[in-house]
Amino acid sequence: MPPLRTKSPCELSTASVACSNAFFAMYAVNPLSQHQLPAFAGLAFPQMRMQLRTGTAAEDVIAIGASVFGAPVGLLLAQLRSGKAAEVKSVVVAREHRRIGIATCLFEALEQELGERACLSASMVCFSRVQPRLAIEGLLRKSGWTPLEARGMCCATEFPLISQAPWMRYRQLPAGFESRLWSALDNEQHSYVVESQRRHPWYPEVLSPFVDGHDVETDTSLALIHSGEVVGWCMFHRVNDGATQCKSLFVRQELQNRGVAIALLVRAIELHRNLRRQTFLFDVSFDKVKMIRFVERRMLPYLKSVWTISRSSKRFNGEPSRSRVAA
């Protein structure tokens, strides 16, 4: 694919009338190849930084970079999903180059790339310490994305702090239940989860234990076993060298009032005691009323920070973009 052309002054910002044409001519916005990624790693969020530095980003990752005289000043990362969809993972513009339209150009370049790949939709999740009015709201509105909608909260803590919580003592499972490392399950047990879900869905796909399986922390992710069958799980995923994220905590609906979910979570957290990764992230959807109540009443005093999770999306017609960034 040919590189996108450098933006003209009027395309980067209406404020450019006060600046010289030469100033804006030094900016360029282009899709990045694998060998260009290391130079832009410093603009990525921590969980993607190492992959960019080593040039090992997955093939389904789309990277759009902005540079000035060849020096990186902006980066947008998106990942292709099934069903001709994509998810924006991060968008960062260097502080001294903000508010002149670079982020808008990054989004336009992404839409052109998604059009070339016949993608039908894209989504983006944003994190904020203060609910709505994020700086990115104006950018999304101008780019034709849906308004940000609050979906849940993301909590961060560390092992020495969370281990002081009184509920961390409740690790005993009821009779008939046992926990087992997810990595210790055999093929038959994995197949049971997949096939039973196919025949009679019993868990939300967003909580599937197989999502982003390559990032699973095998030393701490647990399966819940009852009567010899897998009935739940607590899946931790690697974020970086020092942090993991609880991506999925689920127990079969008819067993959810037995107190097993918290016991399973406690056991999984305890397995981190002697590991390098001592920082934890927990995502909780607002529609999980019981879990939100648990966070607010029992977990909050032992958290270091809490963010609101908001989501925006945009649908496309599956055709290459004819926006002003087209080559």
Image (tube, rainbow, N blue to C red):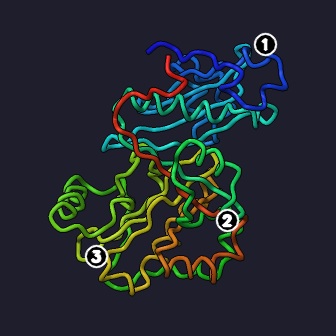
Could you say which quadrant of the image residue 301 lies in?
bottom right
In what element is the residue under mark 1? helix
The three-letter code of the residue at mark 2 reads Gln
In what element is the residue under mark 3? strand
Q: Which of marks 3 and 1 is nearer the N terminus?
A: 1
Residue in the foreground of this view, choosing between 211 and 103: 103
Question: Mark 2 — residue?
Answer: 131
Above or below for 228 versus 84: below
Left or right of 313: which side holds 82? left
Question: Mark 1 — residue?
Answer: 22
Left or right of 322: which side holds 92? right
- Label 2, residues with CA under 10 Å away: few <14, some 14-19, many ≥20: few
Labels 1 & 2 near each other (Cβ < 8 A): no
Could you say which quadrant of the image residue 315 lies in?
top left
The three-letter code of the residue at mark 3 reads His
Q: Which mark is residue 226?
A: 3
Q: Residue at x 62, y 35 (%)?
A: 104
- Label 1, residues with CA under 10 Å away: few <14, some 14-19, many ≥20: few
Pinpoint residue 317: horizontal percent, then vertical percent. 35, 38
Q: In which quarter of the image is the N terminus?
A: top left
Q: Which residue is drawn at 23% across and 77% down?
A: 227
